[in-house]
Image (cartoon, grey):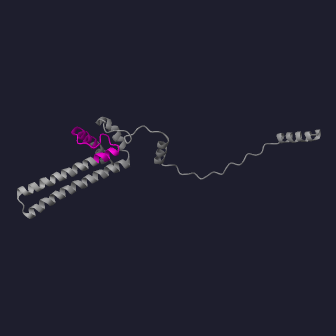
Amino acid sequence: MQNSDLDALLAQLRQSQDAPPAPAPAPAPPTQLQPAPSQAQLDALLSSLSPAAPTSRTRDVTTLSFPESIPILQSLALDSHFLASVVRLRERQDEEEVKLRDERAKIEQECKRKGLSAPAVSSKLRLWDREALARWKKLQGDQQVQLQELGVPTFYRTRNESALKKQERVMSVLLGFLDDEQD
């Protein structure tokens, strides 16, 4: 390479270094703002990103004491989907009670219409009462399982008297929350 070529190359390099810097690219035009996500969307995103502490719906709460159940019930009472599920359970129970009452009344009327004797009526009603009690116990067990699946403390399928009493106490608190919600 000749000196003149080298000088020309060096001059070109100096010139590029001495030149003012190229202007910065223009900022991108502002994009349209998206609406803010709802609280439910944020909660769902957060829960999917971070492992949550066990909740009543994921840990075994069947053996909790009544006092241990109260904070969980308070938390569940804030969930509108949970409350709607409990309302549906309550409505189904009310419907079953009416159905049982009407069926028994119909049997009594049929017995009177047929002119059956008091012992025959009594026998027929006792038989129906046993069948109704079996249906009622099945409904009770089904409700216990449904409440357990909803995460309600102390609930599981049982006939144990002390467990049933605890379930009744928990249910009375839960129904109190429902009554407050409906007021």
Q: Nearer the viewer, residue 72 or 3?
A: 3
Residue found at x 46% / y 44%: 43
Residue found at x 36% / y 43%: 76
Q: Quadrant of residue 13?
A: top right
- Residue 183 shows in this picture: no
Say if 122 sits above or below 174 in the image.
Answer: below
Asked whether, in this view, residue 61 is left or right of residue 51, the answer is left
How many numbered tags mark residues here?
A: 0
Q: Quadrant of residue 73?
A: top left
Q: Position of residue 133 (x, y in %)?
A: 19, 50
Q: Position of residue 45 (x, y in %)?
A: 49, 45
> Does residue 154 show up magenta in the picture?
yes
Magenta-highlighted stretch: main secondary structure? helix
- Residue 107 shows in this picture: yes
Q: Position of residue 38 (x, y in %)?
A: 48, 49
Q: Quadrant of residue 11?
A: top right
> Does residue 106 show up magenta in the picture?
no
Asked whether, in this view, residue 84 is left or right of residue 127, the answer is right
Residue closest to the far bottom: 113
Asked whether, in this view, residue 100 is left or right of residue 88, the answer is left
Q: Nearer the viewer, residue 172 or 138?
A: 138
Picture quarter with the N terminus? top right
Residue found at x 45% / y 47%: 40
Q: Position of residue 21 (x, y in %)?
A: 78, 43
Instruction: State the extent of the magenta-drawn residues as a range.
Output: 143-171
